[in-house]
Amino acid sequence: MPEVSSTLPTGTATQVRADRRPGRVRRVGRRAVAIVNHNRLTRIGFLLTALFVLIAVVGPMILGDGTKQDAGILLSPSGAHPFGTDDLGRDLLTRSVAGSRVSLFVALGSVGLGLLVALPIGLVAGYFGGTWIDELLMGFVDVILALPLFVLGLFLLGITGTGGSQVGPVFVSATLKVVVVIAVGAMPFFARVARAATLNERQEDYVNSLRVLGVPRWKIIFGEVLPNVLPPVMVQAFLWMAIAIFAEAALSFLGLGIQPPEATLGNILSDASSYMLTGAWWYSVLPGAFLSLIIVGLNLVGDGLSDALDPDLRT
Amino acid sequence: MAPMTNDTAVRTDVASSPAPVVLSVENLDVTYPRRGGDVAAVRGVTFQLHEGEALGIVGETGSGKTTTMSALLRLLPQRALVRADAMRLGDRDLTALSDGELRRLRGRELSLIPQRPMTSLSPVTRLGKQLERLDRRPGGAAAPRPELSALLARVGLGPLAERLRAYPHEFSGGQLQRILIAIASLAPQPQILFADEPTATLDVTVQGQILALLSELRAELGLSLVMITHDLGVVAQTCDRVIVMQRGEIVETASVQELFARPRHPYTAQLLADLTRPPAVRGRSASGDPAAPRLRVAGVSCSYARPGTRRRGGRQAVPAVQDVSLTIPAGETLALVGESGCGKSTLAKALVGLLTPVAGTIMLDGLDVTRERVGRGQRSGLQLISQNPFSSLNRRRTIAHALTQALAVRGATPADEREQRARELLEQVGLDASHLGRYASELSGGQLQRVAIARALAAEPRTLVLDEPTASLDVSVTARIVDLLVELQGRLGLTYVWITHEIDVARHVSEQTAVMYLGRIAEQGPTEQVLHRPRHPYTASLLASMPVPDPTRRATFRPLAGEVPSPLSPPSGCVFRTRCPIAQDERCATEVPELRRAGASSSACHFADDVAPRLAAAGTPPIA
């Protein structure tokens, strides 16, 4: 960007950054627009996901947390209660919206935590591919992979109890436990994808060139290889957000997750299961459809990302 | 599309080839519609192919040579717009045929030999099954096995005929290309063979074998050949007539003799001039003191652990480099040549410290860099330029990042001066500061290689190890990069270890040449000696395998037969004896030849002193 550099004193380090920044921002911006517009389904996915985030963040501020029992019980959908009410007289739209906030938190929390653990493991294992370091790390990952998510959940929550618990000075809420369980379940998948991508990257000549130049290993791994490994991992991350939301609902449905009366989509569906055959269709169908739309949206984003970031299809 | 009339007279415009025209193309345009302006990939291409003729289509990347062929065979993607005044195969109008009719022509009368033999067969199906599937007779019956074996034998896979049960990965690249040639000529009435860079991914000796096989089959079956290539040597050795393409247009059409003797278009002339250049004029002051060479490699051996052998009692080692010694004075260039698998790249890795030799020492200015105590700072005197510039820079980092990072590691430049130094480095390699903010994907191969050189220079090296620095570049770009490297060497007093498979490059840049075979040095000495008066039959054979860009020298084109043996079970005695034209049974099979003085060079051959007469007696022509 010559017009930028000409306004700065020459020969300064800031200039390097100034040279780089506008280009990068524009580049990333252009890429983002290209990914969103990849195809119609991806656009729908991004729209649904944006809507979900908006509802989850803003909705509860307007509607409340959905624990108020201030309406008639099992009212069918109407203008005042678009989703109807439940067996305790709570507005189901309010509860669903409040539940979506929990879903968002669980999705971001568990995927974020999973990535935090998995990325270093996958990168290091891939960089030292085929050595004992690789075998040790991936052996650990495979052990976790062998444990089904729900068995893991039963195990953890069975030991520590379903509500929140005090671990030393830290209070671990039930939600946080759910986040940890799902993060542990997701971690092996992230680690494997990161390792596979790193193994490929390891073949590139730039890694050798940097080694010959004497760039320290950790800098090569986390400074140079990581950005190249991120795209496939991000695809996995989005798909796992959908799985995480689903898993939270399933755990809560089984009574292993977040405890009533807190509104989560799983709890609502769990409560609704008793009324499924009594004619109160809205009780399970509307929150269920809401949950499905969130998951479909995230899956479409994940699929779109995986297509758009496929290096073979890029121009 | 112009409507086709069957009575259109077929023009024959080349008086010297009276054979009938089998393929004629008039005013072929291929356009890719794109937002912001269509891209014309091929413009107004007109040519004819005569019966039994070998027509070369030469051009650099993006010149439209493959697009032209794909348009003829209707293999282009849907979005490509193909327009032509006429495309005729014999008296049939290719533009008027339906997709189904054209598909029946492909594989029957029009055959294609692809560029990458490794990926052109299904990896999960046995070879015999694949051949059967391809050769469906009109009645729907598959060809019987013996016929398939005979076919493989015809393309030089005789002893492998029983390997119809093998999978593609069990064959070498050269063998696969032979199989694909067999498939192409297996078409019921083959007329025209399209070969799209059929040897680009193969080794020189194998390339020579494949080219010889193609010429042989063509003569035998009376086929016409369209040879698409960027290699003028291949054209000179195999073609009758040549089309030179540049940016989608034909710039010159001539007989092969005409083209090489009197190129008419400046682009052709430049291509030829870039290809055959005299040794670079440098201050060959022999400034290097032989007593204190810049780089001394003594008895270096390297080996790899064989994959999959780890759990059963220790690793089985595959020797890749064995007992190699080299001495390079400061400011000079050593060219390292040999087929792939000869260990030259392994040696390069050992030199720059990516690999620790199992034996031997590497001394840079008297300091043994193989010892563990030697720090990064001392090692930085040896830098590596790798073959593929598209892979040697991180695609998610800017050029500025690459250069400042290298400077930061070196530590000699204060942080606030690195930006300025990066500009200087870019200028040194013929780029400017406007490239700093760019990403690797925004630069061409030649520019990327310049950046890679600049990055290596950031470490202030005394020696550069160049691992085929121009192998993935176009001819004209190659010449510019070679010029740059020669110029930098003169200016900065650099010492080069230059790995190449291009003899012309070796001749142009190096004082010394070392020839490697199966991990060992076969011959080594002053370049003009080694390349003009080889003292080892392998050097001579390698030179004879090179397609020389001179059609008058087809007689000396004698590709070396066979392939490099596995380093796991090397031949006893002299490792080259299995392919050597002058090998003698007892001595060569039992006695390992030492590298010893022969004339001005050193050679590891028992008959080093009279290689030339023995080769002549064995029927191999002398090297010009």
Image (tube, coloured by chain):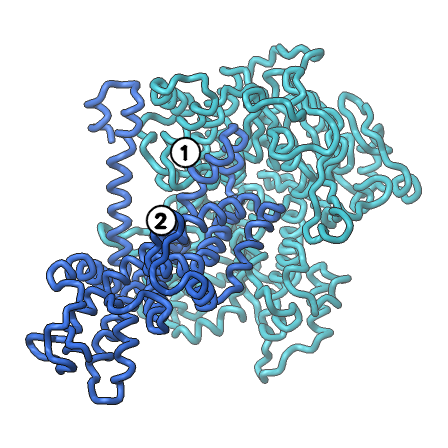
Chain colours: A blue, B cyan
Q: Quick one: A225 or A206, which is closer to the camera?
A: A225
Residue B294 figure quarter: top right
Q: x%, y% of residue A197?
A: 47, 51
Q: Quadrant of residue A103?
A: bottom left
Chain where mark 1 sits: B
On-image quarter of the C terminus of chain B: top right
Distance, label 2 to label 1, CA atoms, is 56 Å
Q: Amino acid at mark 2?
A: Val
Q: Residue at x 27, y 18 (%)?
A: A10
- Residue that numbered label 1 is attached to: B447
Asked if residue B84 lies left or right of residue B189, the reply is left
Q: Position of residue B450 (x, y in %)?
A: 44, 30
The verdict on a common chain for dots 2 and 1 is no
What amino acid type is highlighted by mark number 1?
Answer: Gln
Q: Residue furthest left?
A: A79
Q: Chain of mark 2?
A: A
Residue B125 in view (yes/no): yes
Q: Residue at left 60%, top 67%?
A: B124
Residue B145 in the image, given as x and y percentages of width and height:
71, 75
Judged left or right of residue B185, residue A294 is left
Q: Which residue is mark 2?
A: A170
Residue B178 falls left or right of residue B43: right
Residue in the foreground of this view, choosing between A110 and B123 = A110
Residue farthest toward the right in the current orientation of the protein: B586
Residue nearest the observer in this picture, A228 or B161: A228
**SS category of the residue bearing label 1:** helix
Secondary structure under tag 2 reads: strand
